Amino acid sequence: MTSSCAPRAVLLIEDDARYVRMLGPALRRAGYRPLWAGGAACGLQAAAASSPAAVVLKLDPPDAPGLHALERIQAVTTAPLIVTAAADDPSDGYVRALEAGADDYLLKPFAPAAMLARLRSVWSYAAAEPPPEGGVIVCGDLRLDAAARTVTVDGRAIDLSAAEFRLLAYLASRAGRVVTPRELLRGVWGADYAADAHLARVYVHRARQKIERAPADPRRLVTRPGTGYTLRGVRAAAP
């Protein structure tokens, strides 16, 4: 029988032994159980068999270039997925990975403490309470229920990640205001992310793909150039 207190398993899909040697001991000291796979094929098997609490995936593993590995891993596990990429990647692969559904990213080189902070952050998304300004908020035919953590558009349920939901709830709770990227990042992801403008842009883009009829011409989640973001037409639902 598996103990309810068993340590969380973290699957590392990484072919650079230096990072495996660095992260394995750090994860164990933090009370987690590291698993290792040297490529996408082994990682896919491990993700399906071990039900990890999180997956840390190196972008472009040798046996699955591009985003193929990310897509294959997502097909077998709903665990939060953090991608790692070279800081000098000219294609900004980590941005494409975020757009494809990765939950977070780290640029190499990074210290073990940065990885541990990212893990705590992605785990906190699902466990965190909705913003204190809860209730039901309506924006045209979009309806957000903070207590139930649901969003519908024209009566149709929208499948949002925990971070996407908190982003919309944060903006909805500040109706009539333009929220700067720094404020949005601090409010949704925490102070460690306050300078990560890429992350704000990517998640706003992802939310628009799901709630806007024409994401390229958004009517609800609007960018105010040089200022920030606002959710237009918001009102509290009648009790």
Image (spheres, helix red, strand yellow):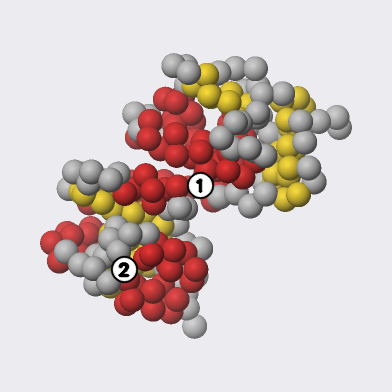
Mark 1, residue position: 125
Is disc 1 surrounded by few (<14), some (14 to 19) or many (20+) residues within 10 Å?
Answer: many
The furthest residue to the bottom = 1
Q: Using the image, determine if residue 78 lies above or below residue 163.
A: below
> Which of the pair 55/73 is nearer the observer?
73
Q: Residue drawn at (28%, 53%), measured in percent from left and top?
A: 84
Q: Position of residue 108 (x, y in %)?
A: 20, 48
Q: Residue at x 42, y 25 (%)?
A: 182
Marks 1 and 2, the one that precedes in the sequence? 2
Q: Secondary structure at mark 2?
A: loop
Quadrant in the picture for the C terminus: top right
Quarter-wise, where is residue 214 in the image?
top right
Q: Could you tell me the amino acid type at mark 2?
A: Ala
Task: Please determine whether, in this image, residue 14 is positioned above or below residue 193.
Answer: below
In this orientation, does residue 145 appear?
no
The outermost residue toward the right is 239
Identity of the amino acid at label 1? Tyr
Q: CA distance from mark 1 to mark 2?
A: 29 Å
Q: Nearer the viewer, mark 1 or mark 2?
A: 2
Horizontal placement of 91 versus 199: left or right? left
Tell me the tag on residue 108. Answer: none
Badge 1 element: helix
Circle 2 residue: 64
**Label 2 near label 1: C-beta < 8 Å?**
no
Q: Residue at x 67, y 39 (%)?
A: 213
Q: Residue visible at 23% across and 43% down?
A: 90
Left or right of residue 192, residue 229 in this image: right
- Residue 70 x/y as whole percent: 40, 62
